[in-house]
Amino acid sequence: MGVKLTELLTLRELEFKDLKGKTIAVDASNWIYQFLAVIRQPDGTPLTDAEGNITSHLMGLFTRNLKLVQLGINLVYIFDGKSPELKLVTQQKREAAKHKAAASYTQAVESKNVEGMRKYASMTSRLTPAMVQESKQLLNQNNY
């Protein structure tokens, strides 16, 4: 849904070195969803463990978090609560887009179109409560 604040802000480009020693708030759901969509096999299959559980989100969180912490950036992860009713229409549109992408993914698989498989598979990503819980557990480990 988001809030457009750009008209109220003065924008300037930053480099990672500019953030050293700073504390940055991270939209955890946004990052996790990004990792689910992007960290995939060439055919669009997400990374999984030996039991077939999706691990793309954990790999992404671990590596990005590690890199930013090594650069001296402090991270605070913000996890979404229950969505407001105002977001219902947006969620319905996203769900419809996922169904359309799933149909396109099926067509890509049938035609052995690997590029299409990857493209459409990433558009069908779903962030589950279990993935959120796993992400919180990883971030609470403090092992890095």
Image (cartoon, rainbow, N blue to C red):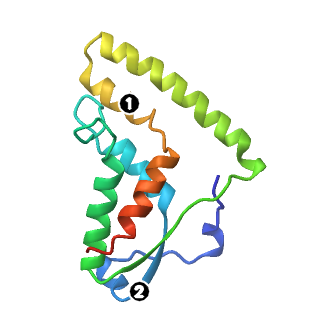
- Residue drawn 38% across and 13% down? 107
Amino acid carrying mark 1 in the image = Ala
Tell me where residue 97 sits by quadrant: top right
Q: Where 11 sits versus 83, above or below?
A: below
**Residue 94: x %, y % from top left:** 59, 36
Position of 82 with respect to 76 (left or right) is: right
- Mark number displayed over residue 41: none
- Secondary-structure class at tag 1: helix
Residue denoted by label 1: 121
**Residue 79: x %, y % from top left:** 55, 62
- Residue drawn 22% across and 39% down? 50
Amino acid carrying mark 2 in the image = Lys
Choose the circle earlier in sequence order: 2 or 1: 2
Q: How far is mark 2 from mark 1, CA to CA?
A: 36 Å
Q: Nearer the viewer, residue 41 or 2?
A: 41
| Quadrant position of the C terminus in the picture | bottom left
- Secondary-structure class at tag 2: loop
Q: Residues within 10 Å of mark 2 (few under 14, many from 20)?
A: few
Q: Where 71 sits versus 124, above or below?
A: below
Residue denoted by label 2: 22
- Residue drawn 67% across and 42% down? 90
Q: Nearer the viewer, residue 18 or 86?
A: 86
